[in-house]
Image (cartoon, grey):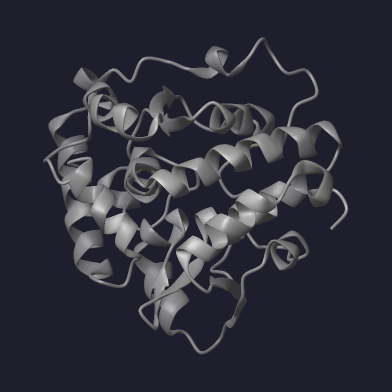
Amino acid sequence: MRHRAQARTDTPQGWRDYVVPQRWDAFTADDHAVWDLLFARQVDLLGSRVVRPFLDGIDLLRLSHPGVPDLDELNAILEPRTGWQTVAVTGLVPDDIFFAMLSERVFPVGNFIRTVEQLDYLEEPDCFHDLFGHIPMLADHDYAGMIEHVGRLGGAAIAAGHGERVARIYWHSVEFGLAREGGDLKILGAGLASSFGEAHFSLESDRVERLPFSVRRAVRTAYRNDVFQPLYLVSETVEATVEEILRTDAEELLTI
């Protein structure tokens, strides 16, 4: 996956070993200003080009409040709604740890934010990518359940030596998926929702392929993590993709 290191074979005691304090008070005025700039710019860019549950999540979780979100305040809204919580991490976590977190409805959030010189691209996922890109969809009950299921699939696939299969499902739906909504092509994935350049590119470029999403196609489709995508998978609807992924069990995944 784009934002996670490779799986380890010497997994530590558990994902809690990777959790650190967010240290919200350590964010500077410049940090908060970068968040506000990124948020305003991305909301304006996306407009109605992103799926409705994403926009609903922005409102439900009060992410438009100025400044970098305080994870404790965010969790006080998110956890009672869908059982998910956010935790701070210092950066990349291994795939096995990442999927273990998802399987327990825990989403890791980088405890840092990019600088003003890095607005358009950051190699490591910062708190803007994690919070703006991923967390709004976790306020949707069905989507939240799907992400937990992906975590369980990931743990099983990694244990069987085929973690790349779930990484591809995650990439082509949760990170860089597109979806149709009311007949219009819209952004679904967090990597697109939080990207200034690729959000436009994914919807408008005539230099890319857009193929219908299926779990089988996602598992069999490699991806690039260093350039804009040459191919995007398009869900017929968000609900259809959620249902298909939820129907996929670990045994089936390993035979695709």
Residue 165 position (above or below residue 130): below
Task: Report x, y in % for residue 145.
Answer: 50, 41
- Displayed quadrant of residue 101: top right
Specify whether 18 is left or right of 184. Answer: right
Task: Say whether residue 65 is left or right of residue 213.
Answer: left
Q: Is residue 163 above or below residue 80?
A: below
- The percent position of residue 204, horizontal first and vertical second, equals 42, 84
Q: Residue at x 59, y 71 (%)?
A: 233
Q: Which percent across, then down, holds residue 41?
A: 20, 61
User: Image quadrant of residue 138?
Assistant: top left
Quadrant location of the C terminus?
bottom right
Q: Please, which residue is most extreme toward the bottom here?
A: 206
Query: Vertically, is 109 above or below 182?
Result: above
Measuring from the top left, give residue 243's x and y in whole percent: 57, 57
For the point 50% across and 47% down, the residue is 123
Q: Residue at x 46, y 49 (%)?
A: 143
Left or right: where 163 falls relative to 142: right
Identity of the residue drawn at 25% across and 30% down:
74
Which is nearer the eye, 68 or 158?
158
